[in-house]
Each structure stands twice: as C-alpha cells, then as structure tokens.
Image: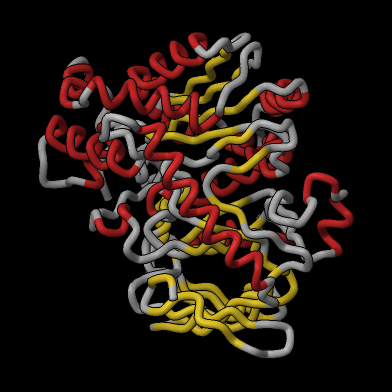
Amino acid sequence: MTAHVPLTTSARDVSASIDPVKLDRLAEVAIKVGLQLQPGQDLVLTSSIAALPLTRRIVEHAYKAGAGLVTPIFNDDEITLARFRHGADAGFDHAAGWLYEGMAKAFSNNAARLAVRGDDPSLLSGQDASKVARANKANSMAYQPALEKITGFDINWNIVAYPETAWARQVFPGDSDEVAVGKLADAIFAASRVDGDDPIGAWKLHNAVLKARTEWLNGHRFHALHFTGPGTDLTVGLADGHEWMGGASTAKNGITCNPNIPTEEVFTTPHALRVSGHVSSTKPLSYQGTLIDDISVRFEEGRIVEAKASRGEDVLKKVLDTDEGSRRLGEVALVPHSSPISKSGLLFFNTLFDENAACHIALGQCYSKCFVNGARLTPEEIASRGGNKSLIHIDWMIGSGRIDIDGVHADGRTVPVMRQGEWA
C-alpha cells in the first residue's frame, strides 16, 4: 500500500518537471478535439485542486474558443480523507444530489462536460471498505440524473489526465517526486498524442483508423464474440441492433467529440442476457481508491454468478451487489496489444489509460449510442434489445498478447477478429 503524503509547499515545485508547451497542447486538444466546444456553449468542469495547472489552461482555451460560462467543481484528497477518518457513520449513505441535479439541468441546457483526472489510485485503500462501498453507492445513485445525460451521449463530453504527485509515485515508485511526475507527464503526453508539433492533425489521422475498424465490425454484424486465452473462455453475445463506435463520435446535440483522451478502443453494447463462460483480468482495476487485482468471474445467462480477486475482493463483491444490473455487462471493447499505451510497458493504475492497453469489458450501464439509431431509442427499446441498466459503469481489462477473439455469426460461422492480441 502506498502511504498517503499530504500536499506540501514543495509539491508546487514538482510541476516544474512538466513540459509547459505540451501541457498547453493537451489543454487545447481537450477543448478542440475532445469537446469541439462550440461558441456560446457552457462548460461544466470537474478537477482536483492538484490539477490546477492543466485546469487553468483548459479554461483559458475554452474561453478562447468562445465558451459561454465555464463552471469548475473541485475536489481534494485531504478533504476526501477527512470524511473517512472523522465523518459520522450515517453520512456515508448520503451524497450531494442537489449538485448532480444541477449538473443534469446544465446538460439539459446543452452544457458540455469535461473531467480532469489524476487521482491517487490508493487514496481509500486503507479506509473502511464498507464505508467506501456505501459512499460509492450513494454517490452513484445521486449522480444518475447527470450520468444518464453522459451515457446517453446527449452532450459532448471529454476526460483528460494530469500527472498528480500521488499518482506518479505509484506508477514510478523508485523515483523522486519530481522525476516521477516528469515521467508520468511524458507518458500522458505521448498517449494523448500531444508530443508532436501537430496534435490536432495527429488526432484526425488516428480517428480515421478507428473509424475503419468500426466500419469493418459493423459490416459483419456479429451475433457474439468468443474470447479464449489463459483463464478465459468467454462468449459475449452482442445486443440486437448494436453498433460499434470508436474515436470521434457525434453526440445527440450534433457535436462530434472524442470522449476519452487518450483512446485506442472500438466498443459496443453486449446483450445483457447472453454472456456465458469465465474470464480473468489481465491488469489490476483501480476503483475509487481501491486496487482490485486478479479478478476472475463466471457468467451464466449474462449474470456474474461467481467472482474472486486476490486483492480487493470485498470491494469487488460490494460493487457487484450495487443493483440488479451491476453483475451484467454494459460494454465490450477491443484494443490491440500493440497500442502505444500497451507498448509503454507501464501500469497506470488508472482506467482511462489501462483500458487503452488491452481489450476490456465494463460492468453496469450500457451506452445507448452503441445502437443503430440509438439517439431515437427509448430506454424501454434499449432494454428490449439487450442493453443493460445500472448505477455503475466500471471497465476492467481482459486482453493481452495471449488472447484470441472470434466473431460469431448467428448461424455459427466464425471469423477471426484478433489473434495473440492483434487485429486478424
């Protein structure tokens, strides 16, 4: 377990190891590629206080792009820990619903959404697992009105990352804070394609490659995907009328955006009732400050009926009991083992990055956009096609250089999709 070290005045000096030119490029890419923020459009921005150097640049580029009003909402590790150390027990069943209702109202009025991530992956690992689970469940329930606008792709939204010190310590445990932050910054810049002179052009080319992958998959209209490899023999049925997505996508408000920076995945919606077999994780899952490692689950008729983990199993099982949909899949995503993030050899302890190093599945809520004409479908129609509904959406990695994937047609014919982790 990584000890949590409070932020001190010396932490400000660590930012000197972050290339300011590339940091500014990342802020510009977040606004111009990630969001494609429109003139007059409001922006709701969440960030940690530690990520202020990037957040300030993002706000500057937002206003340069003609933003209406940018509203930042900040969190802080020490404030979060104070709650778990000293908060009244009953308080862990409550969340700021009023805040999320306000965010949902902003999204209903076409505000864009941007999150700056860089959290300490082990922040809550030493806290009471029951309190962590209760707080997460309360927060998930309160967040639902806003989350539905995001997972329904009503608006343009984006997530980017900042190399906060506690996170950098975990990725590079043998280095000084300054060196670790510098290394993590460079890794973020490379994965986010802002280490060259024309990052916006680089994203245009990358989006074209991802679009070609989705068009090939959509042309086949597979009934299921079959994953095989060490600890894995899993058949993931695909939702009726599913559609593959990847890279740039157009939201219901008509704005084309890149929700995740970085991204290497193409993804779609599984059928909530048609998943069977067993699967093992190939990378640890960092969830709300707890590391869950060596996950192994078994599915029957779409539902997880057995679940184990070598670390964090108690938290995993509490997550699975969140609601009826939390034991079913809401996403399946394909990522080549040769992706830049995989080739970096780093374990980021951060889903935004680690999911782009390997094929993955997500427990919980599906994306309604991953259906043909998904923007026009009602929640009932999405459910009838196999789309899952849940308070959670948690990605975890199941791909590696030893995983094969076959596309299975409705008549049983199979087509190689990936071999040894690479596109076939």
In the image shown, does 373 or 16 lie closer to the viewer?
373
198 in relation to 350, above or below: above
Please report the residue visible at 37 percent of the width from the left and 18 percent of the height from the top.
52
The answer to whether residue 264 shows anywhere in this view is yes
Query: In which quadrant of the rendered image does the C terminus lie?
Result: bottom left
Q: Residue 191 sits in which quadrant?
A: top left
Residue 3 percent location from the top left of the image: 25, 41
Residue 230 percent location from the top left of the image: 39, 83
22 horizontally vs 333: left or right: left
421 in relation to 150, above or below: below
Please report the residue visible at 39 percent of the width from the left and 29 percent of the height from the top.
77
Please report the residue visible at 38 percent of the width from the left and 69 percent of the height from the top.
282
202 in relation to 44, above or below: below
The answer to whether residue 328 shows anywhere in this view is no
In the image shown, does 30 or 90 lie closer to the viewer?
30
Please report the residue visible at 65 percent of the width from the left and 65 percent of the height from the top.
218
312 horizontally vs 409: left or right: left
352 horizontally vs 343: left or right: right
Structure colour scheme = secondary structure
The residue positioned farthest toward the bottom in the image shown: 412
In the image shown, does 267 or 197 lie closer to the viewer?
197
Residue 311 percent location from the top left of the image: 38, 64
Residue 200 percent location from the top left of the image: 41, 32
